[in-house]
Image: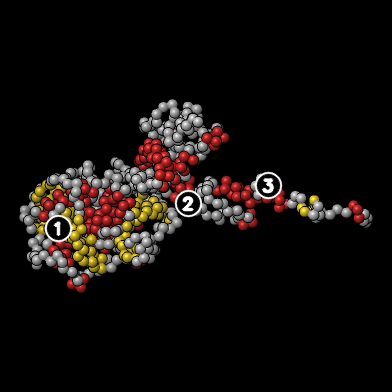
């Protein structure tokens, strides 16, 4: 039994503190003016720290959305950018640049890589000068990183020979189908002439000039280019019929490559009207253009048929009707006339894809323009994107010659995971900036020299051959007479499948330091550089952790070192020790105002 308390002793907890008639210090005023983080901010910070190891870093200048604790579902948040793969060989050094400096250079790279210095406004000249200074410094570390990537490729040489069972079976069937097509040519050949690839008079003004588009037959597929979320898996249809319709059977692809123009009635009819000296296919043109010194590593054989065609007279202004010619069963065929230093060429080619787009950005009407898609298989996607090889640049350049206003899409595919990790869209102007060591004038000079030799041959069947590493080409003539040991047997040379290439050297392709991947932007990493060293504050806070610094770190006590090292790799990558400090012996003395040469000195007042 409890006794009731007096009225003056009763407590009321819901009475707010009063100062006259207004609230003096409410809960709303406390949350408004308090410097303490709110509960949602604390949860956001904890989620950011937990996800930094698994997800890509978000942009530090972007707005952060405050999430309520009840709405957060752990484990279901998807990162905007997929985290990069772990490298097959760990990094041996940390970069000479800090995280802040790498982000700064990455921003300048994206702004001024394609910029014309003569067209930049005065307000951007200072940033452009800083970009050039940082680029000169970064290039030394890029050279060291490429040495490391090449050594890593040699230690993982098996990656370049791995192939799935289905792909191996398809390749064998394709090569067998091509070998069966070889039997359509004469069997024995005798040596007729040997000519130098770079012989004759060299002219820097040599060009392949377009003269006239004669005929277009068949159908071409319309493509709509879009850039999906990358990396994306490449899935082929499981149905055999759909797979053959998409990729084509090995026999069909081999028949397309061996569709000789010497037996093409359309080409013979056009040659009688326009009197070209040489008639060739687009693949034959690429084979002759794709010879690059000084090594001339491409090995090839081209059958040549010399015929005497009765001319009906030059009909240059004639308009061809598609109904008068035989259309292809599949795909399309395009016949065009070109001139090369007074020599008239009739080229039969095809258009891969077309897209519907305006000719200019502000144009209202859309037209069909050619599109060429180049798949590029790469083996070091965890380090960066590979550069375009001379063969690939030559292919894209030739397509731009044969089809004006062609745009290109380069799909970078990771050979180890079969994932598409980068899609590049290139124009003709952008392609010229990617030429590298490719010299179009040399390729045209080789083409001119070989075609002049071919145009001077007598009527008959010939075989034009080139051995890898040889600076000359051989011309063989078919022989039906007595067989001798000096004769070349074409059928016997292609009776068996080609042997596996010797593993003496890895076909390593250098990485491109000017093509950042999405995870480079997310992490603030410069392509083809080592993981960034920590900033000054983070380095002082973690003095107990050690890491070996990149020896090219600039110091105010001496010049920048460009010497190479032995390339020895540590067992554990320094990138896993993010924020590691350097020991006293290897720590650079760059704490003063001259820590980086692109940082300006302040003038004394």
**Does 212 appear above or below 467?**
below
Residue 142 lies in quadrant: top left
Residue lying at 35% horizontally and 51% vertically, measured from the top left = 377
Query: Which of pointers 1 and 3 lies earlier in the amino acid sequence?
Result: 3
Residue 456 x %, y %: 9, 54
> Residue 121 vs residue 406: left or right?
right
Residue lying at 26% horizontally and 51% vertically, measured from the top left = 394
The secondary element bearing badge 3 is classed as loop
> Where does label 1 land, which residue?
344
The secondary element bearing badge 2 is classed as loop
Question: Which residue is more in the foreground, 399 or 414?
Answer: 399
| In this rendering, the label closer to the viewer, 3 or 2 | 3
Q: Are marks 1 and 2 in contact (CB under 8 Å)?
A: no
The residue positioned farthest toward the left in the image shown? 481
The residue positioned farthest toward the bottom in the image shown? 323
Residue 271 x %, y %: 13, 63
Query: Which of pointers 1 and 2 lies earlier in the amino acid sequence?
Result: 2
Residue 560 x %, y %: 40, 31
Question: Which residue is more in the foreground, 245 or 399?
Answer: 399
Disc 1: CA contacts within 10 A as few (<14), some (14-19) or many (>=20) = many
Disc 3: CA contacts within 10 A as few (<14), some (14-19) or many (>=20) = few
| In this rendering, the label closer to the viewer, 1 or 2 | 1
Residue lying at 24% horizontally and 46% vertically, measured from the top left = 439
> Where does label 3 land, which residue?
34
Q: Can residue 72 be seen in the rendering of this structure? A: yes
Quadrant, the N terminus? bottom right
**Does 33 appear above or below 237?**
above
| In this rendering, the label closer to the viewer, 1 or 3 | 3
> Where does label 2 land, which residue?
82
């Amino acid at each position: 039994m409890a006794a009731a308390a007096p009225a003056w002793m009763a407590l009321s907890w819901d009475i707010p503190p009063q100062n006259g008639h207004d609230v003096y210090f409410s809960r709303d005023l406390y949350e408004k003016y308090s410097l303490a983080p709110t509960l949602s901010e604390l949860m956001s910070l904890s989620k950011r720290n937990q996800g930094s190891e698994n997800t890509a870093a978000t942009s530090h200048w972007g707005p952060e959305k405050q999430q309520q604790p009840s709405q957060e579902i752990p484990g279901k948040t998807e990162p905007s950018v997929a985290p990069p793969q772990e490298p097959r060989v760990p990094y041996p050094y940390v970069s000479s640049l800090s995280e802040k400096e790498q982000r700064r250079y990455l921003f300048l790279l994206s702004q001024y890589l394609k910029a014309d210095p003569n067209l930049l406004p005065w307000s951007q000249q200072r940033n452009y000068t800083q970009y050039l200074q940082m680029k000169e410094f970064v290039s030394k570390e890029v050279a060291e990183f490429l040495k490391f990537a090449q050594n890593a490729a040699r230690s993982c040489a098996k990656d370049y020979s791995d192939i799935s069972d289905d792909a191996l079976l398809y390749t064998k069937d394709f090569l067998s189908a091509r070998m069966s097509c070889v039997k359509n040519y004469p069997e024995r050949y005798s040596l007729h002439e040997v000519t130098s690839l770079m012989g004759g008079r060299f002219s820097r003004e040599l060009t392949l000039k377009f003269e006239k588009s004669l005929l277009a037959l068949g159908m071409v597929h319309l493509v709509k280019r879009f850039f999906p979320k990358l990396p994306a898996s490449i899935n082929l249809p499981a149905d055999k019929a759909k797979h053959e319709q998409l990729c084509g059977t090995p026999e069909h692809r081999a028949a397309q490559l061996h569709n000789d123009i010497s037996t093409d009635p359309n080409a013979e009819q056009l040659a009688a009207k326009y009197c070209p000296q040489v008639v060739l296919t687009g693949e034959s043109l690429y084979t002759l253009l794709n010879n690059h010194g000084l090594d001339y590593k491409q090995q090839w054989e081209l059958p040549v048929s010399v015929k005497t065609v009765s001319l009906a007279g030059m009909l240059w202004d004639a308009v061809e009707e598609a109904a008068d010619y035989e259309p292809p069963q599949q795909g399309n065929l395009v016949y065009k006339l070109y001139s090369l230093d007074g020599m008239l060429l009739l080229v039969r080619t095809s258009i891969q894809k077309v897209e519907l787009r305006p000719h200019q950005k502000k144009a209202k009407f859309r037209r069909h323009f050619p599109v060429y898609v180049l798949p590029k298989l790469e083996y070091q996607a965890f380090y960066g994107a590979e550069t375009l090889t001379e063969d690939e640049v030559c292919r894209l350049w030739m397509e731009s010659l044969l089809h004006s206003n062609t745009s290109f899409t380069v799909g970078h595919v990771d050979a180890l995971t079969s994932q598409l990790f980068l899609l590049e869209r290139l124009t003709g102007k952008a392609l010229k900036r990617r030429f590298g060591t490719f010299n179009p004038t040399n390729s045209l000079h080789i083409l001119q020299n070989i075609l002049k030799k071919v145009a001077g041959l007598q009527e008959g069947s010939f075989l034009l051959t080139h051995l890898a590493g040889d600076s000359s080409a051989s011309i063989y003539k078919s022989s039906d007479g007595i067989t001798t040991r000096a004769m070349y047997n074409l059928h016997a040379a292609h009776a068996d499948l080609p042997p596996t290439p010797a593993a003496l050297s890895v076909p390593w392709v250098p990485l491109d330091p000017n093509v950042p991947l999405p995870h480079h932007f997310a992490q603030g990493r410069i392509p083809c550089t080592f993981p960034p060293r920590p900033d000054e504050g983070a380095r002082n806070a973690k003095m107990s952790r050690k890491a070996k610094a990149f020896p090219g770190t600039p110091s105010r006590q001496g010049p920048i070192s460009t010497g190479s090292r032995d390339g020895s790799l540590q067992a554990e990558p320094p990138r896993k020790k993010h924020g590691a400090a350097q020991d006293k012996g290897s720590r650079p003395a760059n704490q003063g105002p001259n820590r980086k040469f692109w940082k300006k000195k302040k003038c004394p007042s």
